[in-house]
Amino acid sequence: MNQTGSHPLVLKHGLTEEYPFNQNYLTTDSGRIHFVDEGTGPVLLFVHGNPTWSFAWRNLIKRFSPTHRCIAIDHLGCGLSEKPQNEVYRLADHIERLQLLVETLDLQQITLIAHDWGGAIGTGVAGRIPQRFSRLVLMNTGAFRSQQIPFRIALCRIPLLGKLGMQGANLFAQAAVHMAVNEAYPLSPKIKKGYLLPYDSWRNRIAIDRFVKDIPLSPSHPSYEALTEVEKGLTKLTAKPILLPWGIKDWCFTPEFLKEFQRIFPEAQTVRFEEAGHYLFEERPQELGDAIAKFIGQTEESTSISSD
């Protein structure tokens, strides 16, 4: 499962300093999934969204891997995972594959750290096997049905036009490295290269296109039932410690999504980053890491006290 050394793409483009992680792979029925597995200790499970990959978590992995086991998946079609050209990119498919990774590695007492689509995928797994999860960190994400969809994303769902823009011209990923980094704008050329690296051709951008099309806005959508099940599963997580770090100037997962999470999880801790946008891990990596470290420390202490 482990292959020592950096991925050839990372080496070729001089990104080993930013992304100095060994390759790890899990073979699934749909294709081979790449994941980061660094450090030992309590498990942090990082789950990315669209159009990112495990590169987004590099700063947090480097910070926490001396004391924690950091697992960061690349969803099928994303990052360094295989990119099959068939229909294996529904929400339910991503949930199944993440659950397979969790169970294959026999991860226990997991701290879930999720962003964007990773929130629905990660909580989808946590709702199925809540006994394996200790706490959740959910940032600028959603895990429930909503009619809110930004106009810019709605355009990407227009047949042919959206496909040409996302898979052909890579407009979605290109726009993200500009529009999602409010306080970190402009990203350095090297970091932009890191985000765009796996999405360098029509074939390699298939998951970006499929993720956008998989947003279920009506009961007739193929993933509506899966998202409904994710939403129902949140009730199994309400007793767990939950942290909600949020970039308030996110144009995609707006503060309305934060309010809904606060309604579902009234005991959750919230850390608002008033000037930050969608990519907290780029805009405020130090402060985000501090908030997560404080949250883990506090909740580990309270869990220990309650069990004594």
Image (cartoon, grey):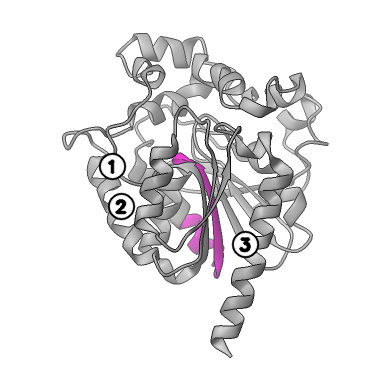
Whether the residues at callouts 2 and 1 have beta carbons within 8 Å, the answer is yes
The residue type indicated by label 2 comes to: Glu
Mark closer to the chain start, 3 or 2: 2
Residue 200 % position (x, y): 60, 18
The residue type indicated by label 3 comes to: Phe
Residue 28 % position (x, y): 46, 48
Q: Closer to the observer: label 1 or label 3?
A: 3
Decide if residue 23 is in sight here.
no
Disc 2 on helix, strand or loop? Answer: helix
Q: Residue furthest front?
A: 274
Residue under label 2: 231
Residue under label 3: 295
The residue type indicated by label 1 comes to: Arg
Front in this rendered view, residue 238 or 124: 238
Q: Answer with the quarter of the image where residue 284 lies.
A: top right
Disc 3 on helix, strand or loop? Answer: helix
Q: Answer with the quarter of the image where residue 224 lies.
A: top left
Spatial separation of the CA atoms under disc 2 and disc 1: 7 Å
Residue 102 % position (x, y): 51, 60
Residue under label 1: 145
